[in-house]
Amino acid sequence: MNSVPTLGPPPRLVDAVEIARSAAVEEAAADIGHEAAAGAVGEHLEAQPEDEGAVTHFFAATQGGYRGWRWSVTLAAAGDDTPVTVSEVVLLPGSEALVAPAWVPWSERVRPGDLGVGDLLPPPEDDERVVPAYIASDDPAVEEVAVEIGLGRMRVLSRFGRESAARRWHDGERGPASDMARAAPGRCATCAFFLPIAGSMRGAFGACANEYSPADGAVVEVGFGCGAHSDVQPDPMSPVAVAELVYDDGVDLEPVGRT
């Protein structure tokens, strides 16, 4: 049984390199002007058949900022007696092209410290760090106070929100593993300037109230510490070593007579 040969595009579409080049130059001129457009379309790279009536020509993109990109021009013809037409002209990235990273939503690009004066950052609708009303807070201290005084917030921290904050504070620069804490003479848990926070995290975190501490006004872990601990005692000794008075009795001294 003889196989039926596959028909490719007509040779005149494959050979129509200059028609394809002219189309690419015209497309480039719309963006960078006619004078620079001719230099923006480089050498012919290849001709790729699309079907029996179409072929795509690729040209190197030589304009600045498009290293590794290619001009793609698709030509078509309805038959042997029909003219060659330009179906599409696009600029495509090649395997070595510099392309922009994948788009990331703005809400996912924001990082701690990005918020400035006057900026607004509403929490997402499905933010698992907060829950509606105090009844879902899962924090007995919050629920007890809210019921007692008849007040409540629209949203409060969920268990996940508290655990996430606790983990971040514990691992941060004011946690027990920081360089400052390892060199400190004592821990915040035993310092008079330590103010425990309210709620279920009272036993683990508080705020520093020592204006001379690098953590003044910030949340600190009970295992954190600094050189401004309230139990630090002044050193009565001079930090500069002073040698005792030494008498050199190896020198003979003779009185000087009067003249």
Image: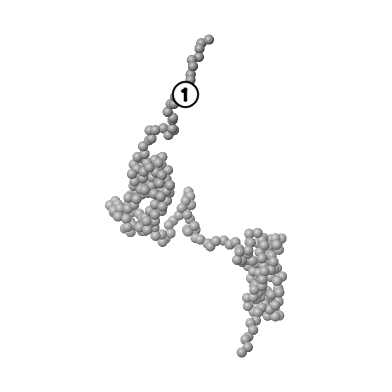
Quadrant assignment, res 194: top left
Residue located at (70% from left, 73% from top): 16
Please indicate whether residue 147 sits to the left or right of residue 9 in the image: left
Q: Secondary structure at mark 1?
A: loop
In the rendered image, the vertical position of residue 24 relative to residue 157, given as above or below? below
In the rendered image, the vertical position of residue 24 relative to residue 212, given as above or below? below
Answer yes or no: is residue 12 visible.
yes
* Residue 100 drawn at (x, y percent): 57, 61
* Residue 99 drawn at (x, y percent): 58, 62
Quadrant assignment, res 78: bottom right
* Residue 103 drawn at (x, y percent): 52, 62
Residue located at (45% from left, 54% from top): 121
Q: Which residue is mark 1?
A: 250
Residue with the most extreme bottom position: 1
Residue located at (63% from left, 82% from top): 6
Quadrant location of the N terminus in the rendered image: bottom right
Please indicate whether residue 209 sits to the left or right of residue 92 in the image: left
Answer yes or no: is residue 150 visible.
no
* Residue 113 drawn at (x, y percent): 47, 51
Pick the residue in front: 95 or 62: 95
In the rendered image, the vertical position of residue 227 relative to residue 164, given as above or below? above
Q: How is the image coloured?
A: one colour
Residue with the most extreme left position: 148
Residue located at (32% from left, 50% from top): 203
Number of on-image labels: 1
Please indicate whether residue 1 sits to the left or right of residue 142 in the image: right
In the rendered image, the vertical position of residue 230 relative to residue 162, given as above or below? above
Question: At label 1, which amino acid type do we have?
Answer: Gly
